[in-house]
Structures are given as C-alpha cells and as structure tokens.
C-alpha cells in the first residue's frame, strides 16, 4: 500500500511539473507575440528542480546584501508555480523598496495593494500569484501602467533595468 501511494505521489508530481512547463511555454509564446522583452531568456523546459536551482542562485546573487537575501529559491519556485518570469518579482522589489529595505507594510517589498504578510516566503508567493493573475507572464509598458499608473514609464524603465541584472 505504501509503495502504491509513493508511486501515485510521484506520478502526480510529474504531471504537475509537465502542466507547469506547458503553461509557462504557452505564456511565453503569448508574451512574445505581444512584443514583451526578454521572453526567451527563461527556459521552463529544464524542469522544476533545475529551474529553481538555476534561477534561485541568480536571484540570490542579485539580492545579496539586502533584506531579501537568501530568498532566491522562493522567488524561483513562486515563478515556476505561477508561470511568470522569475526575474520580475525580485526586480519589482528593488523598484518599490530597494529589495525589501524600505517596505510599506510587513514583508511587503512591492507596494502591493497595501498588504502586509507574515513572512518573506508568504509574500513572495502571494506577489507572484498576483502578478500571474493580474498582469500575465512578464513586464510590459501596459503592465507598468496598471501597476504604477502615476509614474509608469519611469517605473517600467527602472524595473526592466533591474530584470536585466538578474
């Protein structure tokens, strides 16, 4: 019985991973068709483990010396689960709070709808889910206008500049 449960869990994990890959590739294609920048810099076809390891390390290097340091894997996993560019949320954290240094509310490095969270892991996951649901795969000028209407052109330039650094 335990062996059957283990096999079923492994099969479910493989199915979920395949679904995430398919969804992410489709969202990248949609973003590319709309002219979004840097769409092909992210390879979701390498699988979750390699994706989280690769992007987690890159994001950790970017966040070094800031309050969000050490949460690269959380950003990468949240990006994987929500089919978004793994650089996006981390870059927004720089634009909005200098990578968690000047938060609007508890664990809110993104100026995100006035929310406060109970941990960085919870907030990273919540922000990535919100980006996915409300904005799509990655940054665009239209998404910047929606996220930060008063200064969206500057916000867009600052955020995409940070994305390129990751």
Image: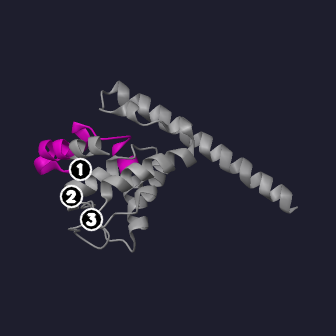
- Residue at the image position 36 percent from the left and 50 percent from the top: 131
In-front residue for pair 93/118: 93
> Which secondary structure lies at badge 1?
helix
The answer to which of marks 2 and 1 sits earlier in the sequence is 2
Question: Which one is closest to the eye, mark 2 or mark 1?
Answer: 2
Q: Is residue 119 above or below residue 97?
A: below
Residue 20 shown left or right of residue 155 in the figure: right
- Label 2 neighbour load within 10 Å: few <14, some 14-19, many 20+: many
- Residue at the image position 50 percent from the left and 38 percent from the top: 44
Q: Point out residue 148 in the picture as x, y percentages from the top left corner.
A: 18, 51
What is the magenta range? 131-158
Cβ atoms at labels 1 and 3 below 8 Å apart:
no
Which numbered disc covers residue 147?
1
Q: Is residue 104 above or below residue 34?
A: below
In-front residue for pair 133/125: 125
- Label 3 neighbour load within 10 Å: few <14, some 14-19, many 20+: many
| Helix, strand or loop: magenta stretch | helix
| Residue 49 is inside the magenta segment | no
Residue 123 shown left or right of residue 163 in the figure: right
- Residue at the image position 36 percent from the left and 71 percent from the top: 117
Residue occupied by mark 2: 96
Residue 75, quarter of the rendered image:
bottom left
Q: Point out residue 21 in the picture as x, y percentages from the top left corner.
A: 55, 38
Report if residue 65 is visible in the image.
Answer: yes
Residue occupied by mark 3: 100
Q: Point out residue 152 in the picture as x, y percentages from the top left corner.
A: 15, 45
């Amino acid at each position: 019985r335990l062996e059957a449960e283990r096999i079923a869990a492994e099969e479910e994990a493989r199915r979920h991973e395949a679904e995430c890959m398919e969804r992410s590739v489709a969202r990248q294609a949609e973003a590319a068709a709309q002219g979004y920048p840097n769409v092909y810099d992210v390879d979701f076809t390498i699988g979750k483990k390699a994706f989280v390891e690769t992007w987690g390390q890159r994001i950790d290097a970017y966040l070094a010396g800031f309050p969000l340091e050490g949460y690269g894997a959380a950003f990468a996993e949240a990006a994987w689960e929500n089919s978004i560019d793994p650089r996006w949320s981390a870059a927004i954290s720089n634009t909005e709070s200098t990578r968690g240094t000047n938060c609007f509310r508890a664990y809110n490095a993104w100026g995100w709808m006035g929310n406060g969270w109970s941990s960085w892991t919870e907030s990273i996951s919540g922000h990535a889910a919100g980006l996915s649901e409300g904005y799509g795969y990655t940054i665009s000028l239209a998404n910047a206008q929606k996220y930060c209407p008063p200064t969206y052109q500057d916000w867009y330039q600052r955020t995409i500049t940070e994305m390129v650094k990751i």
